[in-house]
């Protein structure tokens, strides 16, 4: 190894003085190992003994010999059998020291002596005192005392400045390392590794240069495991470091592994206080800490340790951090490396860290903390509670694992009330995993074991909510609720009423106004905490159906956690509120909000066994409305098949699929999915169009397929149910479907009524669709100007719903409805300049019928116009044709000819 030695002249002067009888000492010191002390020592020895002018006595200390008195001295005087094996007492030590100096003097008188001592910091204290004794007397001897020392556990050896010199070996600078690496032919990346992973320590620089010459580090699994760099560090830790230095190295590596700043204070706690050389030690700790932040160095140090050592260090660091008030996650990250958290404070920190991690959206990290906490000694109820929490975290990422964990938690609980809570959590998890029948079995078993009327009623009510996911159980559950309603406690009655009202709303047995009144009367009422989210989910559902979207959204937001905290799927009420939040935003035309809030959840749960088809349906429809039909189809496909699951959520997915088929122009497929949705809804006694207006969609598809009579039958039924519910959205939407199935004046009147209803409502999708149809209807009867105005209004509504087009940088917008409105506008014939006295097409048709002898009433019926409109057209025609009487129409129209006004549709 090339040694950068800057004091050759001092060394040569000292050697010359020693040979002349005026001995000197030289101490080569370094803050850390690997600085080249031994190499420098060997170089000096070779140089000074090359010509035989000096004889050498060698000694090298080792950590394992520190406890043996005079071990180093016996190496120097191996031929002296009188060196004792114990520490001489008082004057005996002085006599021994003096005898050895005298013997050395006699030997040096024959030929100057070079005493070379390596690793003096590992020497026993008696030997170190003898070295100090010699240094004070070396000036009169032909002796050169050369020693090396590194920061160690011993107190610094104080040598007289008058008889020698101490040199501190410093790390190589970054520029020096770069020169060495480039001289060895290493590239930029390898050179950077040399700088970062060596900390300028020459031994590590040389090892890295050699290793990197064979290829990048770390090696792939198929490559040989040998690494000079790793071997160098491992050798230091295992064989060269004293016990405390070893602990410091390991502590630094363990601290760096978890990102903890390992200053001297932390090291004192982990390794024990050290009273000597505080400033020098701080410098060495800082340099080692910097080095061990590099993964190659850290891995090498940790490879030299036993697993028990690393675990113990993590435990001590965790305890120190906990006592200093560090964040729970910082403490818990250390405890993960402890085999079993055996103390109460450890479990408490892991619990706190799990809460903090989940609040930050780091679910996997939170689950890891809880899993580790469960490895410790816990009271049965505590273990059960942590198990349930872990199951809730595992559920979205593996339904099977989460449900199994929840089953375990339920079995661990011994208190009846705790078992009820655990049973409701497990049942919600089973619903999310699409096992509603199993969820009901769990709740029924818990009901039988409850033994308390109040608990039985809580479970009965929650069972009814879960039954909405099972068409066979839903009717019976509602019947049970009707029987419970008159006797239900005040804290349970709101949810009982809410679920009954949901059934009646779907069955067409109550109006939106009545449902809203029932909800609002009970919103301020006290509710059993175990039913709170379920009640708010039911209330929010009814408010959403009643088109009180802001109120529904507000209820959802009071319970659902803000991002990035994931929703708890072991709460069936939160599952309801997730659905309400998504659908309320969709109905309001907030498509990007629907996608932003729900697409990440749908994507994260895809393929993990958790399927919430309603959310997938909402995301799919929102993506379709924003013009991203491929992504919409992907969202639908991600929900998977329904299998034997008869939940209402699959009906929502069928409805979404039907809308996508319609957007693609596949009307037969759209009809099939609408009818599939209707069959599923009917199985739940859900005939109202409030949630999935499948009849309207089917009617529109039937019209496109030329089956107008079937369409009219469905549309009339839809309109009847819509008027029962009575919201502007449901009636306006049904009127549009009805208008598509009829024609003439009836269609125009229906669309006009729909537009008037939807205008004040927050129903932008339905309004835009109705305005497009109304505009086309006006144009078809010759009222082009009004038709164009209506289509422009539809385009304005659609434009508010549009989103930036992909790849446009925000300069263009897109959306399904915008495309529909623009297409309709593009189909309107271009206006041409009018000729003098030219009539519009509408005016000409009215005038021709009047000329043929038809009365205004007959013209009104024939053209589906109001009598007022007929009179307006005739008045305008008289003015343009400069006539005053009806009898003049025949001759004037014949003179004007058929081309008059033919190009003007307005």
Image: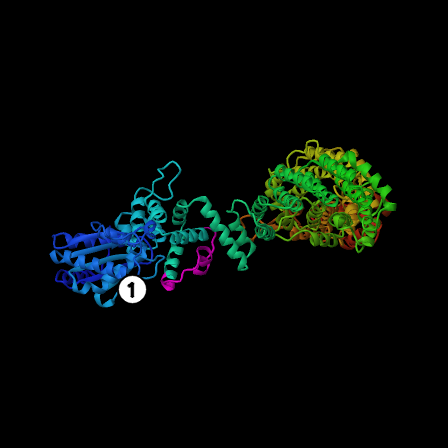
Magenta stretch? 257-280
Residue 274 is a magenta residue: yes
Colour pattern of the rendering: rainbow
The answer to whether residue 418 is seen in the rendering is yes
Q: Is residue 365 above or below residue 114?
A: above
Front residue of this view, candidates 835 and 137: 137
Q: Nearer the viewer, residue 671 or 404?
A: 404
Q: Which residue corresponds to the image point at 64% horizontal and 53% vertical from the top-left?
A: 562
Tell me where residue 80 appears, x and y as whole percent: 21, 51
Q: Residues within 10 Å of mark 1 (few under 14, many from 20)?
A: few
* Image height of 722 relative to 884, above or below: above
Q: Residue furthest top?
A: 644
Q: Which residue is mark 1?
A: 158
Q: Position of residue 864 (x, y in %)?
A: 81, 45
For residue 689, say whether it is visible. no
- Image coords of residue 496 (percent x, y): 81, 46
x then y, percent, for residue 662: 67, 38
Foreground residue among 647 and 452: 452
């Amino acid at each position: 190894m090339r040694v950068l030695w800057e004091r050759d002249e001092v060394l040569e002067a000292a050697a010359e003085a020693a040979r002349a009888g005026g001995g000197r000492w030289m101490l080569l010191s370094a803050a850390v190992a690997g600085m080249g002390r031994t190499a420098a020592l060997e170089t000096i020895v070779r140089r000074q003994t090359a010509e035989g002018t000096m004889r050498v006595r060698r000694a090298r200390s080792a950590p394992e010999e520190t406890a043996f008195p005079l071990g180093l001295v016996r190496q120097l005087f191996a031929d002296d059998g009188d060196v004792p094996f114990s520490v001489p007492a008082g004057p005996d030590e002085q006599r021994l020291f003096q005898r050895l100096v005298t013997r050395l003097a006699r030997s040096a008188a024959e030929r100057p002596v070079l005493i070379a001592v390596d690793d003096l910091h590992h020497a026993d204290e008696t030997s170190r005192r003898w070295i100090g004794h010699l240094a004070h007397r070396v000036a009169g001897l032909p002796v050169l005392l050369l020693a090396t020392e590194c920061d160690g556990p011993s107190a610094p050896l104080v040598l007289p400045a008058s008889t020698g010199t101490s040199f501190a070996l410093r790390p190589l600078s970054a520029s020096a390392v770069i020169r060495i690496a480039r001289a060895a032919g290493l590239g930029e990346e390898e050179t950077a590794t040399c700088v970062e992973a060596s900390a300028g320590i020459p031994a590590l620089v040389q090892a890295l240069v050699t290793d990197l010459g064979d290829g990048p580090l770390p090696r792939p699994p198929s490559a040989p495991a040998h690494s000079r760099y790793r071997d160098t560090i491992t050798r230091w830790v295992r064989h060269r470091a004293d016990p405390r230095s070893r602990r410091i190295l390991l502590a630094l590596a363990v601290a760096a592994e978890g990102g903890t700043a390992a200053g001297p204070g932390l090291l004192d706690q982990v390794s024990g206080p050290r009273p000597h050389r505080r400033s020098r030690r701080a410098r060495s700790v800082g340099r080692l800490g910097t080095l061990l932040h590099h993964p190659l160095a850290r891995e090498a140090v940790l490879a030299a340790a036993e697993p028990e050592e690393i675990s113990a260090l993590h435990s001590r660091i965790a305890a120190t951090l906990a006592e200093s008030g560090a964040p729970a996650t910082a403490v818990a990250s250390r405890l993960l490396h402890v085999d079993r958290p055996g103390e109460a404070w450890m479990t408490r920190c892991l619990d706190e860290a799990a809460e903090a991690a989940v609040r930050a959206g780091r679910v996997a990290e939170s689950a890891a903390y809880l899993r580790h906490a469960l490895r410790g000694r816990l009271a049965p109820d505590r273990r059960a509670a942590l198990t349930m929490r872990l199951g809730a975290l595992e559920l979205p990422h593996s339904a099977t694992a989460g449900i199994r964990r929840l089953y375990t938690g339920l079995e661990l609980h011994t208190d009846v009330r705790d078992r009820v809570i655990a049973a409701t959590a497990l049942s919600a998890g089973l619903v999310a995993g699409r096992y509603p029948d199993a969820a009901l079995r769990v709740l029924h078993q818990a009901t039988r074991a409850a033994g308390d009327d109040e608990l039985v009623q809580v479970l009965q009510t929650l069972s009814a909510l879960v039954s909405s996911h099972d068409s066979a159980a839903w009717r019976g559950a509602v019947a049970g609720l009707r029987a419970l309603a008159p006797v239900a406690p005040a804290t349970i009655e709101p949810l009982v009423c809410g679920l009954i009202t949901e059934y009646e709303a779907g069955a067409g047995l109550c109006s939106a106004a009545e449902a809203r009144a029932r909800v609002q009367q009970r919103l301020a009422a006290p509710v059993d905490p175990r039913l709170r989210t379920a009640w708010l989910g039911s209330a929010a559902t009814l408010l959403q159906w009643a088109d009180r979207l802001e109120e529904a959204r507000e209820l959802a937001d009071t319970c659902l956690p803000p991002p990035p905290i994931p929703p708890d799927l072991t709460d069936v009420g939160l599952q309801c509120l997730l659905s309400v939040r998504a659908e309320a935003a969709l109905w309001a035309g907030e498509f990007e909000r629907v996608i932003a809030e729900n697409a990440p959840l749908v994507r994260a749960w895809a393929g993990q066994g958790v399927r919430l088809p309603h959310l997938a349906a909402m995301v799919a429809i929102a993506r379709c409305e924003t013009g991203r039909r491929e992504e919409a189809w992907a969202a639908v496909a991600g929900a998977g098949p329904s299998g034997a699951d008869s939940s209402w959520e699959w009906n929502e997915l069928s409805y979404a699929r039907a809308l996508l088929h319609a957007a693609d122009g596949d009307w037969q497929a759209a009809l099939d999915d609408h009818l599939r949705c209707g069959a599923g809804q009917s199985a739940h006694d859900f005939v109202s169009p409030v949630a999935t207006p499948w009849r309207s969609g089917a009617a529109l598809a039937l019209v496109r397929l030329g089956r107008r009579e079937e369409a009219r039958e469905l549309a009339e039924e839809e309109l009847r149910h819509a008027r029962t519910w009575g919201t502007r959205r449901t009636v306006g939407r049904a009127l549009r479907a009805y208008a598509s199935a009829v024609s003439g004046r009836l269609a125009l009147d229906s669309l006009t009524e729909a537009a008037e209803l939807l205008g004040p409502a927050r129903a932008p999708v339905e309004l835009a669709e109705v305005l497009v149809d109304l505009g086309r209807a006006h144009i078809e009867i010759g009222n082009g100007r009004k038709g164009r105005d209506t289509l422009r209004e539809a385009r304005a509504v659609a434009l508010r719903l549009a989103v930036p087009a992909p790849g446009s940088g925000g300069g263009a917008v897109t959306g399904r409805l915008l495309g529909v409105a623009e297409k309709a506008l593009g189909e309107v014939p271009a206006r041409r300049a009018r000729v003098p006295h030219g009539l519009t097409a509408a005016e000409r048709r009215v005038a021709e019928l009047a000329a043929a002898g038809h009365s205004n009433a007959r013209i009104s019926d024939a053209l589906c116009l109001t009598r007022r409109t007929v009179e307006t057209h005739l008045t305008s025609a008289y003015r343009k044709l400069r006539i005053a009487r009806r009898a003049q129409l025949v001759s004037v129209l014949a003179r004007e000819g058929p081309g008059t006004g033919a190009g003007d549709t307005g």
